[in-house]
Image (tube, rainbow, N blue to C red):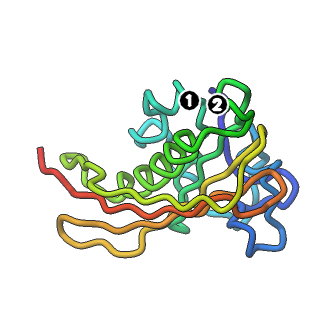
């Protein structure tokens, strides 16, 4: 899978529809140029959540971790992700949200900790045509064992297509 990073057009990590510079067609594109003043992503080899088997199977692109506490995961949805009506299957959208929120939670854990999603809720706002969709996840609250996260998913036009929340439980090894 190619390296992913900042938006080539805006030279920033896209933040969502509320950001006037957000363009999901350009979000997480391969090999962005370095940007002065932008937080350097962490070494991908130390991020065990960026290359999860489910990401490779479905085709998720996970942006490198940055200091802004936002996790971005994108998918170029194709016919293989479609339901019988030719739209992106709701299960794929749910998996994208779960991957983004799980990655966001996993990145704050200690090396000896794991986690499990214990609750997931997805609200679909509109059907999604085949094309690029981007999930933007953030930690809302984290306790010693339980964390609560939320996520927005936007289509290639920047339209909000789904929101999601999840609760994760930390498991010590």
x 48%, y 40%: residue: 50
Circle 2/circle 1 CB separation < 8 Å: yes
Q: Earlier in the sequence, mark 2 or mark 1?
A: 1
137 lies above or below 59? below
* Mark 2 crowdedness (10 Å alpha carbons): few <14, some 14-19, many ≥20: some
Using the numbered discs, state the Cα–Cα distance from disc 2 to disc 1 in whole angstroms: 8 Å
Which label number is shown at residue 81? Answer: 2
- Circle 1 sits in a helix, a strand or a loop, which is it? helix
Q: Which image quarter: residue 107?
A: bottom left
- Callout 1: few (<14), some (14-19), or many (20+) C-alpha neighbours within 10 Å? some
Q: Quadrant of the C terminus?
A: top left
Q: Is residue 43 left or right of residue 120?
A: right
Q: Nearer the viewer, residue 162 or 116?
A: 162
Q: Which residue is mark 1?
A: 58
Question: What is the quadrant of the N terminus in the image?
Answer: top right
Q: Residue at x 68, y 64 (%)?
A: 38
Q: Residue at x 84, y 61 (%)?
A: 10
Q: Position of residue 19 (x, y in %)?
A: 76, 73
**Residue 35 appears at what percent x and percent y?**
76, 58
Residue 32 location, quadrant: top right
Toward the viewer: 5 or 35? Answer: 5
Q: Is residue 21 left or right of residue 133?
A: right
From the viewer's perspective, tell me whether residue 88 is left or right of residue 56.
right
């Amino acid at each position: 899978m190619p390296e992913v990073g900042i938006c080539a057009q805006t030279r920033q990590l896209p933040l969502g529809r509320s950001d006037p510079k957000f363009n999901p067609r350009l979000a997480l594109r391969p090999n962005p140029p370095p940007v002065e003043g932008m937080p350097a992503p962490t070494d991908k080899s130390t991020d065990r959540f960026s290359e999860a088997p489910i990401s490779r199977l479905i085709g998720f692109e996970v942006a490198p971790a940055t200091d802004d506490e936002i996790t971005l995961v994108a998918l170029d949805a194709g016919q293989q992700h479609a339901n019988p009506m030719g739209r992106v299957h709701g299960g794929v959208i749910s998996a994208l949200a779960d991957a983004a929120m799980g990655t966001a939670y996993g990145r704050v854990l200690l090396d000896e900790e794991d986690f499990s999603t214990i609750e997931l809720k997805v609200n679909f706002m509109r059907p999604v045509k085949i094309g690029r969709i981007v999930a933007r996840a953030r930690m809302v609250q984290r306790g010693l064992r339980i964390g609560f996260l939320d996520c927005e998913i936007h289509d290639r036009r920047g339209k909000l297509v789904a929101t999601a929340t999840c609760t994760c439980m930390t498991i010590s090894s």
